[in-house]
Amino acid sequence: MSDNITIRELEFVPLLSEKQVQDRVAELGEALTERYGGSNPLFISILSGAFVFASDLMRQFRADCEVGFVKLSSYSGTRSSGSVQTVMGLEKELKGRHLIVLEDIIDTGRTLHFFLDHLRGQEPASICTVTFLRKPDAAEFPVQVDYVGFDIGNEFVVGYGLDYEGIGRNLPGVYVHNE
Ligand code: XMP
Ligand code: MG
């Protein structure tokens, strides 16, 4: 396995190797091909973190498919839940489509909870959610999760699309902050 790394004075230790990641992504691709092959699903990648996962997973999907990208921005300071989000960039018609939503990581579940609500309003034929990582101990919002790459502890991770202050997205494996 690879060595520890340092990003802006924080130390990270290896958690998942490139091979572990790629093997799991291939399994997920196979499962999705079995379920959605022939229905031309629309992959929706949530930016920025999920772009690496989306890129690899799509290439393990062995049938026709499309991809779209969406950026979610949150505004704090509202009275109720403390966060309202807007959706930018999703210009495709979703009505009647089979949607496969791709996330890099589910932490509290806030991002996906909100976004799924938004998608349901567009009358898609179906919605499936796939997250590369999930932190079960951090869950606060109920979310439908159909496929999970790996469950991890409630710790900060970088690599494979995930960053610390913008750095680390290009790492082929996943590293966890060593506290
Ligand atoms: P929620 O709480 O909405 O969080 O489920 C999901 C978003 O939070 C970010 N996040 C992380 N980013 N390492 C990161 O680089 C982490 O350990 C981590 N935990 C949460 C991420 O942007 C994700 O989409
Ligand atoms: Mg980030």
Image (tube, helix red, strand yellow):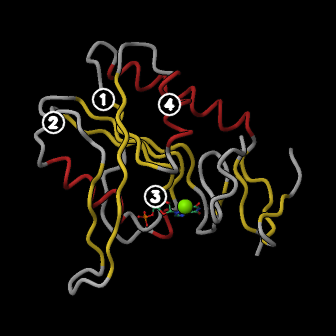
- Residue 20, by quadrant, is top right
Give the labeled residue for mark 3. 106
Mark 2: secondary structure: loop
Task: Looking at the image, tell me whether mark 2 or mark 1 is earlier in sequence order.
Answer: 1
Task: Looking at the image, tell me whether mark 3 or mark 2 is earlier in sequence order.
Answer: 3
User: Which class describes the residues within 10 Å of circle 2: few (<14), some (14-19), or many (20+)?
Assistant: some
Give the labeled residue for mark 1. 42
Q: Nearer the viewer, mark 3 or mark 1?
A: 1
Give the labeled residue for mark 2. 124
Alpha carbon distance from label 2 to label 4:
22 Å
The amino acid type, in three-letter code, at marker 4 is Leu
Q: Is residue 161 left or right of residue 63?
A: right
Q: Is residue 121 left or right of residue 7?
A: left
The amino acid type, in three-letter code, at marker 1 is Leu
- Residue 173, by quadrant, is top right
Pick out the residue farthest to the right: 3
Task: Looking at the image, tell me whether mark 3 or mark 4 is earlier in sequence order.
Answer: 4
Alpha carbon distance from label 3 to label 1:
20 Å
Q: Is residue 51 above or below residue 25?
A: below
Q: Residue at x 35, y 38 (%)?
A: 44
Alpha carbon distance from label 2 to label 1:
10 Å
Q: Are marks 3 and 1 in contact (CB under 8 Å)?
A: no
